[in-house]
Image: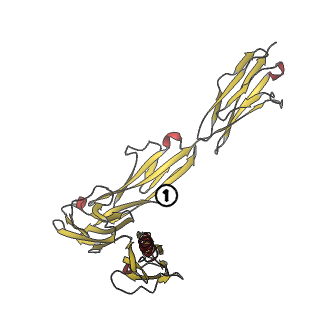
Amino acid sequence: MKVQTVALLLSAVLHSVWGQSPVVTVRPRAAAVKPGEAVSFHCRVTGGSQPVQLEWRRTNSQPLGDNVKLGPDGAVLTIASVRLGDQGGYRCIATNAQGKGMTTASLNIRQPPKVRVTPAGPLSVTAGDSVTLECSVTGKPRPSISWIKQGSDTALVSTTTEATASLQVTVMSAEDVGVFVCRAQSREGLAEGQVELTLKGGAFPQASVTETDLTAVEGQSVTMHCHASGSPAPVISWSKLRAPLPWQHKAHGGVLTLSHVGRQDSGQYICNATNALGFSEAYVQLEVDSPPYATTLTEETVARPGDALRLQCLAHGTHPIRFRWTRVGGASMSPGAESTKDGLLKIAQLRVTDSGTYKCVATNHVGSSEALTKVTVRA
């Protein structure tokens, strides 16, 4: 009896080990890619009797696309140049003599936001009119939608659903028209669409400058050019940081001339174009560079042999400024001399032969300047 019992138990164990249906896993279980990218799913048999046949099917019963490739043993499914229709589940089915095992991977298609604004515009409206702007958005994941007016980041009040945002604009004056922007944003990116509203019988002024960033050297003259469109023709004025221009600067229409500029002339200059419908501004940032002006903390130093020497050179002007110390007359520096980036010359132990005149030269990309200091070492 004991022999028969052991045989039966051994048979049951062998059957459980060697007579199982397949067990499969898939990696990754889920993937999210953009259209045009490629993705692969790997099906692995982790248990069950051999031989095992692998097969891939779509969970929606549709055939595999013509952009789907299978590896030699059927374990790897690769989708090249993913299309929107490829989204869904992909099931790996493993079959042996004892049965089947299966597992499923899911594919999601990520889509950057896209925006369509209707009506397309530009729209010309009469004071007192009301117009509705419609913004339709697509993308995965679902983007957030908002309306703003160009020149401001404040969201306007709109009627919003999952895929649309309707903005009603009532035009009572020139301040109510302009460019309205629909903005759709998700982790896949940002998309914008816009429509321009104008008042009938005129055109809102639009200012622009030839160059938005200018650099000059002290003493030079600088000319800024501003252009403006609109109806009636806008009047152009200039200001600096919204304050009146210095008296020596001359403005003639859209041309601003700055003569003999100094460091104090650096800053933002504003061109303002104004007509009956409103105003528009354009900006020029001016940076005035200056050559260095070098000085030393002391003009003369008296010391004894063995003393430590510290000579500090200072310089005003546009940075970065480089410093270099030399001795006047061609004498060589003490072997123990050390100079730093910030213009400090150090000699740990002076000798009588270190007496003399020392010159600091400060240099930047505009020019250079020098300063002298006399050192006397008395025994």
Q: Residue furthest front?
A: 1
Q: Residue 87, how many percent across, how many down?
A: 37, 77
In the image, residue 284 sits, relative to residue 33, either above or below, namely above
The image quadrant of residue 15 is bottom left
Q: Residue 272, how many percent across, how many down?
A: 36, 54
What's the coloring here? secondary structure
Residue in view at x 47 percent, y 50 percent: 285
- Count of labels shown? 1
Placement of the N terminus among the 4 image quadrants: bottom left
Residue in view at x 44 percent, y 51 percent: 251
Q: Residues within 10 Å of mark 1 (few under 14, many from 20)?
A: few
Residue at the disc numbered 1: 211
Q: Residue 366, how many percent across, how many down?
A: 64, 44
Q: Is residue 45 left or right of residue 229?
A: right
Placement of the C terminus among the 4 image quadrants: top right
Residue 62 seen: yes
Q: Nearer the viewer, residue 177 or 82?
A: 82
Residue in view at x 69 percent, y 25 percent: 311
Q: Nearer the viewer, residue 189 or 333?
A: 189
Q: Is residue 328 left or right of residue 122?
A: right
Q: Nearer the viewer, residue 159 or 17?
A: 17
Kind of residue sitting beneath label 1: Glu
In the image, residue 184 sits, relative to residue 311, either above or below, namely below
Residue in view at x 26 percent, y 72 percent: 123
The image quadrant of residue 6 is bottom left
Q: Residue 130, how many percent across, how many down?
A: 17, 68
Q: Nearer the viewer, residue 192 or 70?
A: 70
Say which element carries label 1: loop
Residue 259 seen: no
